[in-house]
Image (cartoon, rainbow, N blue to C red):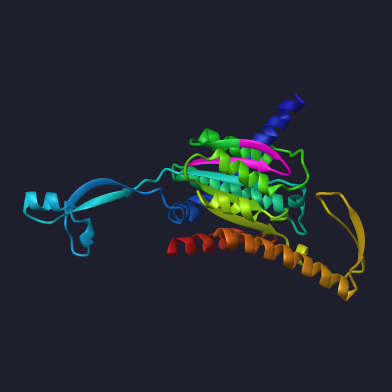
């Protein structure tokens, strides 16, 4: 009976996640996703009479000559695309100084993107990675597939603790045969990954969503504090009342953030930072709107 109860609890968790995120998609992000990630190109639809304001280059000269009045060609966007979500599930993502862990917020963002893809009839896929590739769901269409994806977001437990972002980026490049959207969701705490990020961007539309907790950026001066590297398990004590200790901590975080910024800049990848202590809705909306305008 106990395994059956566990299954019911899992399905209830997945359903709650689906309902909560689907509300955001329906009311806020469905249109933004579609406009921010354009289709692969345009396909001919029909011809219609010329109207003031139509571009001259769209005139169908053969049809216009045959019918004795100007006609223009109408094109439709080739909408169907593939979205692949690369989700970092390393141990460093299981940190949170408030009510939310980075891993929880990252999973909700992944769910939002997957459900937005479903709403726009795109295929959605998921790669969970730590210091290895943990789980792969190749991009497919359909509500059943997306429900399976949501279930992995809720239930999967990684074997690795570290982060090999370079391997995940290279795996995505090998997996995807046609131009796709790739959403990388990670805290970026990994050895240099600029080159594989640049290689992936050469063929695909890549977005890097960096999760962070404000406590990672600065120490609170409360005296001696035990800190642990969640990926290696190493622990040490720091005297947070000493200004030089707090300064070194801030500098280390600033360097890590600068490496992420430089990697995105070098690879021409759009990057967005998500503070997990706050709602991710407005930063994501602002990001999508910036892409729409551009």
86, above or below 251, in the image: above
**Most common secondary structure along the magenta stretch:** strand
Left or right: residue 136 versus residue 132 is left
**Which residues are drawn in magenta?**
123-136
- Relative side of 276 to 125, left or right: right
Residue 124 is situated, as x and y percent measured from the top left of the image, at: 52, 41
> In the rendered image, is residue 187 in sight?
no
Residue 144 shows in the view = yes
User: Residue 94 versus residue 181: which sits nearer the camera?
Assistant: 181
Percent x, y of residue 283 = 58, 62
What residue is at 70 percent from the left and 38 percent from the top?
Answer: 156
Rendered residue at 54%/34% (across/down) = 145
Viewer-nearest residue: 17 or 120: 120
Give the residue furthest to the left. Answer: 68
**Residue 127 counted in the magenta span:** yes
Give the tally of numbered discs: 0
Query: Residue 1, percent across and down?
Result: 75, 24
Q: Residue drawn at (66%, 60%), measured in percent from left and top?
A: 260
* Residue found at x 22% / y 64%: 53
* Residue 151 point in image, percent of width and height: 63, 37
Q: Is residue 285 above or below residue 79?
A: below
Task: Locate residue 11: give its quadrant.
Answer: top right
| Quadrant for the C terminus in the image | bottom left
> Where on the picture, by quarter, is residue 218?
bottom right
Side of 230 where 24 appears, left or right: left
Q: Is 84 a magenta residue? A: no
253 vs 120, left or right, is right
Name the residue furthest bottom.
Answer: 243
As displayed, is residue 113 above or below residue 210?
Answer: above
């Amino acid at each position: 009976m106990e395994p059956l109860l566990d299954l019911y609890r899992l399905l209830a968790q997945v359903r709650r996640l689906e309902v909560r995120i689907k509300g955001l998609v329906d009311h806020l992000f469905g249109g933004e996703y579609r406009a921010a990630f354009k289709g692969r190109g345009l396909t001919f639809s029909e011809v219609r009479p010329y109207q003031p304001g139509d571009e001259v280059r769209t005139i169908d000269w053969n049809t216009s000559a045959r019918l004795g009045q100007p006609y223009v060609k109408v094109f439709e966007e080739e909408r169907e695309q593939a979205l692949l979500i690369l989700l970092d599930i390393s141990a460093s993502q299981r940190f949170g100084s408030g009510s939310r862990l980075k891993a929880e917020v990252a999973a909700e963002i992944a769910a939002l993107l997957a459900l937005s893809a479903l709403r726009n009839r795109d295929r959605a896929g998921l790669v969970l990675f730590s210091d290895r590739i943990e789980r792969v769901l190749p991009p497919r269409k359909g509500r059943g597939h997306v429900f399976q994806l949501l279930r992995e977001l809720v239930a999967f437990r990684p074997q690795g603790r570290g982060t090999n972002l370079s391997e995940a980026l290279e795996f995505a490049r090998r997996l995807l045969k046609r131009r796709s959207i790739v959403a990388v969701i990670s805290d970026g705490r990994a050895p240099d990954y600029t080159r594989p990020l640049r290689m992936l961007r050469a063929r695909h539309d890549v977005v890097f969503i960096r999760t962070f907790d404000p406590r990672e950026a600065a120490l609170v001066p409360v005296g001696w504090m035990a800190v642990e590297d969640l990926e290696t398990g190493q622990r040490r004590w720091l005297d947070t009342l000493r200004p030089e200790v707090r300064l070194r901590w801030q500098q280390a975080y600033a360097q890590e953030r600068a490496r992420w910024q430089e990697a995105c800049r070098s690879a021409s990848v759009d990057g967005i930072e998500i503070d997990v202590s706050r709602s991710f809705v407005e930063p994501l909306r602002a990001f999508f709107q910036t892409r729409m305008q551009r």
